[in-house]
Amino acid sequence: MLITLALLAIVDIVVGVSNDAINFLNSAIGSKVLSFRTIMIISSIGIFIGAVYSSGMMEVARKGIFNPGEFYFDEIMVIFLAVIMTDILLLDFFNTLGLPTSTTVSIVFNLLGAAIVMSLIKIAENNESVSDLVNYINTEKATMIIGGILLSVLIAFSIGVIVQWISRLIFSFQYEKKLKSFGFVFGGIALTAITYFIFIKGLKGSPYYKDLISYIGDNDLLILIISIIIFSLFSYVFEFLTKKSVLLIVIGIGTFGLALAFSGNDLVNFIGVSMAAYHSYEAWIASGIDASLFSMEVLDKKVPAEPLLLFLAGGVMVVTLWFSKKAKTVAETEISLSRQIDTHEKFSPNFLSRALVSSSSWFSSKVFNVLPNVVQNKIELSFKQVQGKVLTKDQSINAPAFDMIRASVNLMVAGILISIATSMKLPLSTTYVTFMVAMGTSLSDKAWGRESAVYRVAGVLNVIGGWFLTAFGALFASGIVVFLINWNKEIMIPIMLIITVSILVRNFLYHKRIQNAKIDPESLKKSESKTVQGIISESSDNIIKVLKRSDKIFSMVVNGLTKEDEEELKKTKKGVKKLNSEIEDLRDNIFYFIKNLDETSIRGSNFYIIILADLTDIAESLDYISKKSYKHVNNQHKKLRFNQLKDLNDISQSFNNLLNQIIEVFKDQRFETISIVMSQLLQLRNNINDRINTQINLTRKEASSPKNTSLYFNLLLEIKDLLKSILNLIDEYSKSYKKE
């Protein structure tokens, strides 16, 4: 068990850093004022220093949640093993989804859940009352943590909104000139806040922390005033000599401070349990008492962590930061939710996000209208964004997500809030604070505009929901694992380890597959050409791909109906859904497409829009055909009659031949022969009309299944619409091609 705990501690560091990297990387990465390499070096130094001086925080895992003296050595080891296994799986689950969560909350509720179940087992064995649970659990601490979670979310978001709103009102989006005038004062305040945060929060637990606090004494205010003056002078000199904004220094030092604080305070979340287990083992070995009789009162004493282990843990954290792909996935979530310009939205809107956006818009408009016109004009001017080149959604991903003002506020506000909470000894999650501050500044900066608000709010709600899932999931999962291991250690420990490793491997392979997924060569491409000729050429490629996929989907539908193959019909639904999604992306890109056209090529936009409309009609017909067919088979209705299936197979064969001819015409650009193909399409439509009339006569004369007849008629009618859409498509294309 001890060896297992040591190995799992390394894994816990990896999954923990992958999730918590969001806390200190995103402001610097999002603003893109420093190179990625520079950001990583600064963060690595902060992480390593924080890890080496994190000894004092290890007490949380030893006695912060439960009373160790109430448990024996064999029981405490079961608790620790269950905690670290469930903590790893929970954090890795969130990493795979790309959602930030709190490693502090995860470890605390894992400890709480495991300790509660082990306490209940002891209570049952000793014939005690459930009310005796308070003797085993540190209920006061647990209550404070839950209260801290709720408060940190609300306070961080609110303060982020207020400070960013004031900052933007002062500096506006055209902040360069104002920064030259009095930006050094802003820099002085920001650097003071961040450095104060580093010493108060970041170095807590270090050998110098007590000396530092005793030196400061009651002179906090005086020190802050002197620091603001010194840092303001430094900012002025820096800008004068380098001709660069001091916000570069603010972002760099802020990133270092958050990285240091994360490592110094959150390392306990990753190795604290394993180190507590090691200290328990040392005490038990020295005692010579049976494991089931040795009380763990020794954990009530303060035991410094081994410097070598802290050094190694810091090294693992730095390596993980550089090489973890999941850390980048988690970071992308917050950056996408706080991006100033519209881009690909990661989350889908829901009822709650729509309601919140609607009510907030109504309330803000009412408040704004109450203000005097002069104030309204001043606010509108400050929040008016610089109009540059219109970027496509794909291009916007590589552009800075926000400017240096917002990045500095994110780091400064997060640092101050965590400093205050630490000085007041309030439990606080660095993830919750940094994330909610970033969301608050995004809202205040109008990054959540009419075009993106419902998506962004839905994303924030998903992340917050995940936080509560972390707490409840950790509480119940660790308790279940404790129960199973305690039931039969020899059998359940190997089984639980196999399950843990299997899930980790599965999540790793899933994430790798998603990250390394190559772009499907058959997927539709957005038009990037600025000329009519280029648009026509690019549209030709998309038409070929749509026709190929339409032929495949239609053939699968007919084959699925013939064989009553539910799985094959389900695949057709997925294929149509993917096609619809790609066409929808092309339609969403129309604004950017038109904006980037040459003045002489504006008429190309009309052609492009008509082609997209025809492609949409094709996809909608396929969607109807696929869903109707799947529903029929899935509901176990009678199979289509032999003659009906024969008709559909004949149509499918003719459809396949015609589409292949059309594809060859588009490939070779031989549009002089397109009239022959169009006449064959019309002939096939007439043929379908004949089959409809035949089926009407059969329905009147012979008894047949109403469901079969309904499906057959619906399919034939929709196939006619499908052929009509294809006719319109090739007719429009051939006309435009001949004009050019």
Image (spheres, rainbow, N blue to C red):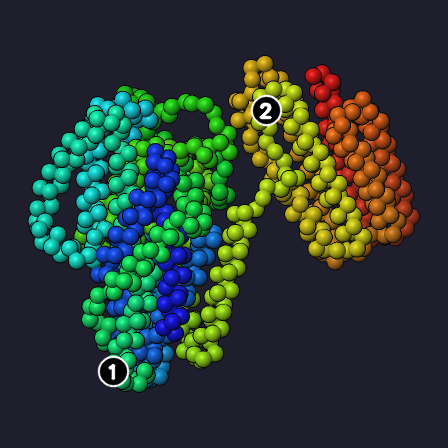
Residue 407 picture location, percent across and down: 32, 37
Indicate the position of residue 148 as horizontal and vertical percent values: 28, 55
Secondary element at image label 1: helix
- Say which residue label 1 marks: 287
Please give left or right for residue 650 compared with residue 27 in the image. right
Image quadrant assignment for residue 477:
bottom left
Q: Is residue 213 left or right of residue 427?
A: left
Front one among 221 and 383: 221
Q: Is residue 246 above or below residue 51?
A: above
- Which amino acid lies under the numbered mark 1 shown in the image of this protein? Ser
Q: What kind of residue is marked 2?
A: Ser
Q: Residue at x 32, y 59 (%)?
A: 313
Where residue 601 sits in the image (x, y, percent)?
Answer: 60, 17
> What is the x, y in percent for residue 29?
37, 39
Left or right: residue 298 compared with residue 433: left
Q: Is residue 494 above or below residue 738?
A: below
Q: Quadrant of residue 388?
A: top left
Residue at image coords 91%, 48% = 701
